[in-house]
Amino acid sequence: MPAPEIELTEEQRLFRTAIAKLVAREVTPRVAAAEAAETFPVELFPIFGDAGFLCPTFPETYGGAGADTLSFCLLAEELGRAASGIAGSIVAHCSIGTSAVLAYGNEEQRRRFLPDAIRGRSIFCFAATEPNVGSDLAAMQTRAVREAGDYVLEGEKSFITNGGICTHALVAARGGEGEEGLSLFVVPREASGFSVGPKVPKLGNRSSDCVSLRLSGCRVPEENRIGPAGDGLKMLVNSLNGGRMVVAARALGVAGAAFDAAVAYARERRQFGQRIGDFEAIQMKLAQMATRLRAAKLLVYDAARVKDRGENAALPAAMAKLFATETAKWVCDEALQIHGAYGYTREFPVERYWRDARLTTIIEGTSEIQQLVIARRLL
């Protein structure tokens, strides 16, 4: 018999059931075309917004559902199960794209930016990574200089999810003219000097929009700066801690889809007069896959519960991100192996799962960075 379900509240179970139905109705039918065109179906934003599933943890005051972090993880997991690329664009908007506005913005900024973001009428991207800046955020080169009551931004951002479809970009830039450290700015797409580069040709997650951005004399008003000048690094780190749980949950979804595909194939595929699932070699693979997946899920759900209790979730979030994403990479590889030569073809979805899972060990802090975060917390 299958392992018992990990305990959820009644509200969380209903949330998961509702999102699974919405994903089956609105996301799954769009996956093939979105992957082939390497384009995110932007109509999903208002669809999810109208259904109450965008920025679900945001307060009802701004139009959010007031859900807990674990429910947000369930959203990412169900989306990841259908299409990791589509999941990436939606959860980036809901987490690192907008979370700093909620956490550090003033009331006027929250009321100006959040209701439309929650309804899917606006789309946010998070612009921190640069051509020569990834894990080392403190080395950021994009600059923001005060000029006549505005800030003028100069720099280039790379690998920006939602950059090509965004209405607003949350941009991190280094201060100038006496301002030290990093600051965060909400930059409207129509701002002068804001330009979008070509699509990034990615190995996987092809249904997620990803581009470079250029800021050349890009002028934004001072009232679009989020939080105090120079506090951007702290805001980025805190946003990434929450984002890591969501990436881990998304990885759970991809790995779960790959595992289900492997079980189904092991039941149907026959060799030497019997199902391949009757061979102990395949059974051992499935046993290891199921065990690691359950362990990863427990870590992710535990990290979300720690955050929901108001405790510091940096350590459990890093552990969840590290283990869940590495597990997803391994599970998808094993699922492809179980499929044999068919797994390497586009006739079966496991090749997409295999390609998509690989990214999760890189974004929101690589596996190596997670290990450093964990070790430093322990020491």
Image (spheres, rainbow, N blue to C red):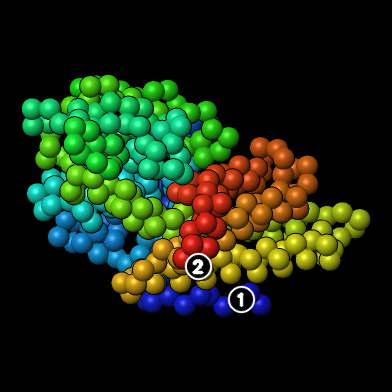
Residue at image location 48% in from the left, 58% down from the top: 373
Q: Are marks 1 and 2 in contact (CB under 8 Å)?
A: no
Whether 7 is drawn above or below 95: the answer is below
Whole-percent x and y of residue 46? 28, 44
Q: Amino acid at mark 2?
A: Leu
Count all numbered tags in the image, as a single digit.
Answer: 2
User: Which of 152 and 69 lies nearest the eye of the viewer?
Assistant: 152
Q: Quadrant of the N terminus?
A: bottom right
Whole-percent x and y of residue 117? 24, 46
Decide: few, some or many residues near mark 1? Use Cα within 10 Å; few <14, some 14-19, many ≥20.
few
Whole-percent x and y of residue 35? 51, 35
Is disc 2 placed on a helix, strand or loop? loop
* C-alpha span from label 1 to label 2: 36 Å
User: Which of 251 and 23 lies nearest the eye of the viewer?
Assistant: 251
- Tell me which corner region of the image, top left, top right, bottom left or bottom right, holds residue 153: top left
Q: Amino acid at mark 1?
A: Ala
Most extreme residue toward the front is 178
Q: Please indicate, yes or no, whether residue 213 appears anywhere in the rendered image.
A: no
Q: Which residue is mark 2?
A: 379
Q: Which residue is mark 1?
A: 3
Most extreme residue toward the right is 272
Residue at image location 24% in from the left, 41% down from the top: 180
Residue at image location 30% in from the left, 23% down from the top: 195
